[in-house]
């Protein structure tokens, strides 16, 4: 059986590996795990789904399988963002939840995310246990077969399943975290690109309620995402960039397929990457709200956060890639903010998982309170802490031994890269060379395919490309 969980759930191509039969197998294994950790039947779980092809039908099958395994299931009555489903776990006092989504992956993929009682991602040991249960069930012939019930029957009267709307309690909670009085007073003009994803309508609902002039792009249902890869990075946001440049907007905001990631565009039509978004929001919380606490970032995230933490005397933890590692820190200490370079971020008082909707609203709050254009706020931050520029290349390669590559990159670590001295080497996830001016190069093999990811950050934009090329040469794959 090839079903394996990655850093944030199981994902596969629809109709190849992601089939109804396999979804039932995984749903049964998850429900067996839930019963194992709770020690009883009748525990409550939440099931949500995004806008992808057949996501609603897959979610019904997940709900049915879990109900058949003696769990009480709360099933979203329509597509919803992952953060809304995650908050519903807390709100409904459930023991966990399943989100049917492939997040930012291309339209041909779908997937399942398992969330814990806290609403955050499952820990690696939890997903390993689910994989073990799945293998055990297959070995013993214990599977979840289809029944006389069919998808066309719906689940409204199915024993053990309750339909619910996650939007009202989630938005009510979000309103307690954001300074909407300041937003109302600012009367901003905002463009929102939902990328045909499950975040559609959420940001605009809050902003319109406080008097913002909001235009929403790609908010209609389109399971194929209009041919767009639903990841809020610059190359996928052509329509948003065009609208911003032509429409005199204060800011453009974008969320991915399940709205747990954020991207932004300033009033001049320039993309603002997640590294700067993380830094801007953290600086805003520290300066405007006088908030304090530790900060957690993944190994591939900007050194600008290190500068901020040094200035304010805050503990900083660097983790492997994956929000589950950030969640783990948030469950054991007072973390003010955590996030990763892909655009997933969260703050204290919220679910310990990425939330693109909340981060979008914090950017709006930042504009409202500072009363400056976003590009000027970014420039101010860079003037104070130094310029930081980032780049990443993904290379499909021949198959290689990941452990051997990591060991070689450690043992053969160069003394200098470009004209900079290597001052520290980190192998927590791949191999990261930190240079004497706080620039860095990370070579990180994919955990699931013959793919090499190379990341770099430098103080000068031109050096980013040189570092990436140096990384490809050092890796020699």
Image: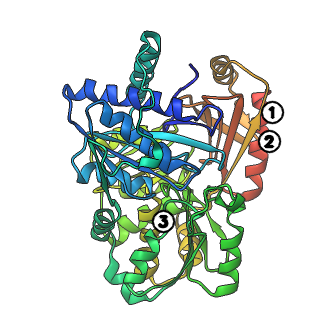
Residue 469 is tagged as 2
Q: Earlier in the sequence, mark 2 or mark 3?
A: 3
Mark 1 or mark 3: name the one nearer the start of the chain.
3
Marks 2 and 1: in contact by CB < 8 Å? yes
Q: Is residue 178 above or below residue 78?
A: below
Do we see residue 425 in this rendering? yes
Toward the viewer: 301 or 438? 301
| 39 on left or right of 219 | left
* Residue where numbered disc 3 is placed: 280
Going 52% across and 30% down the picture, which residue do you hit?
21
Q: Reply above or below: 462 against 394.
A: below
Which structural element holds mark 1? helix
How far across and how far down the image is residue 395, in percent? 76, 37
Q: In the image, what residue occupies the spot 67% across and 29% down?
A: 449
CA gap, disc 1 and disc 3 = 34 Å
Residue at the far front in the pictured view: 148
In 3D space, how far apart are the residues under numbered discs 2 and 3 (Cα atoms)? 29 Å
The residue at 32%/75% (across/down) is 179
Rendered-image quadrant of the N terminus: top right
Res. 167 image quadrant = bottom left
Q: Residue furthest top?
A: 140
**Percent position of residue 114, x then y:** 41, 38
Above or below, 477 relative to 307:
above
Front-most of residues 111 and 208 = 111
Residue count near mark 3 (Cα–Cα under 10 Å), binned few <14, some 14–19, many ≥20: many
Q: Which residue is mark 1?
A: 473
């Amino acid at each position: 059986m090839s079903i394996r969980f990655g850093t944030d759930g199981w994902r596969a191509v629809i109709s190849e590996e992601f089939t109804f039969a396999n979804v039932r197998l995984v749903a049964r294994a998850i429900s067996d795990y839930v019963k194992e950790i709770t020690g009883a039947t009748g525990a409550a779980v939440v099931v949500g789904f995004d806008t992808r092809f057949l996501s609603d039908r897959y979610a019904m099958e997940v709900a049915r399988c879990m109900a058949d395994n003696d769990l009480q299931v709360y099933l979203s009555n329509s597509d919803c963002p992952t953060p809304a489903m995650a908050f519903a776990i807390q709100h409904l006092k459930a023991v966990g939840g399943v989100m049917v989504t492939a997040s930012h992956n291309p339209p041909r993929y779908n997937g399942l995310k398992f969330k814990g009682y806290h609403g955050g991602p499952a820990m690696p040991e939890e997903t390993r246990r689910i994989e073990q249960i799945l293998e055990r069930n297959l070995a013993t012939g214990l599977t979840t077969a289809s029944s006389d019930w069919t998808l066309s029957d719906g689940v409204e009267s199915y024993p053990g399943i309750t339909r619910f709307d996650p939007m009202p309690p989630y938005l009510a909670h979000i309103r307690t975290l954001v300074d909407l009085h300041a937003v109302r007073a600012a009367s901003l003009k905002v463009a929102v690109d939902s990328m045909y994803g499950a975040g559609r309508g959420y940001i605009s609902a809050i902003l319109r309620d406080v008097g913002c002039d909001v235009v929403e792009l790609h908010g209609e249902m389109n399971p194929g995402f209009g041919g767009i890869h639903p990841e809020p990075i610059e190359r996928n946001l052509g329509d948003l960039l065009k609208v911003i440049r032509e429409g005199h907007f204060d800011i453009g905001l974008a969320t991915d397929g399940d709205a747990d990631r954020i991207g932004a565009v300033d009033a001049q039509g320039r993309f603002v990457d997640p590294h700067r978004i993380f830094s801007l929001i953290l600086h805003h919380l520290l300066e405007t709200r006088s908030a304090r606490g530790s900060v957690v970032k993944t190994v591939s995230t900007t050194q600008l956060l290190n500068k901020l933490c040094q200035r304010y005397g805050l503990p900083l933890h660097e983790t492997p890639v994956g929000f589950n590692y950030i969640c783990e820190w948030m469950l054991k200490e007072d973390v003010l903010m955590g996030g990763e370079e892909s655009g997933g971020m969260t703050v204290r008082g919220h679910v310990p998982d990425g939330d693109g909707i909340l981060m979008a609203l914090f950017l709006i709050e930042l504009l409202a309170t500072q009363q400056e254009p976003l590009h000027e706020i970014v420039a101010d931050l860079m003037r104070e802490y130094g310029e930081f520029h980032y780049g990443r290349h993904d290379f499909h390669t021949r198959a290689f031994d990941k452990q051997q590559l990591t060991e070689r990159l450690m043992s053969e670590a160069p003394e200098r890269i470009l004209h900079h001295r290597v001052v520290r080497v980190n192998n927590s996830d791949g191999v990261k060379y930190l240079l004497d001016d706080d620039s860095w190069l990370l070579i990180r093999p994919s955990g699931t395919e013959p793919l090499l990811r190379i990341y770099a950050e430098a103080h000068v934009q031109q050096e980013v490309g040189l570092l990436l090329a140096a990384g490809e040469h050092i890796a020699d794959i």
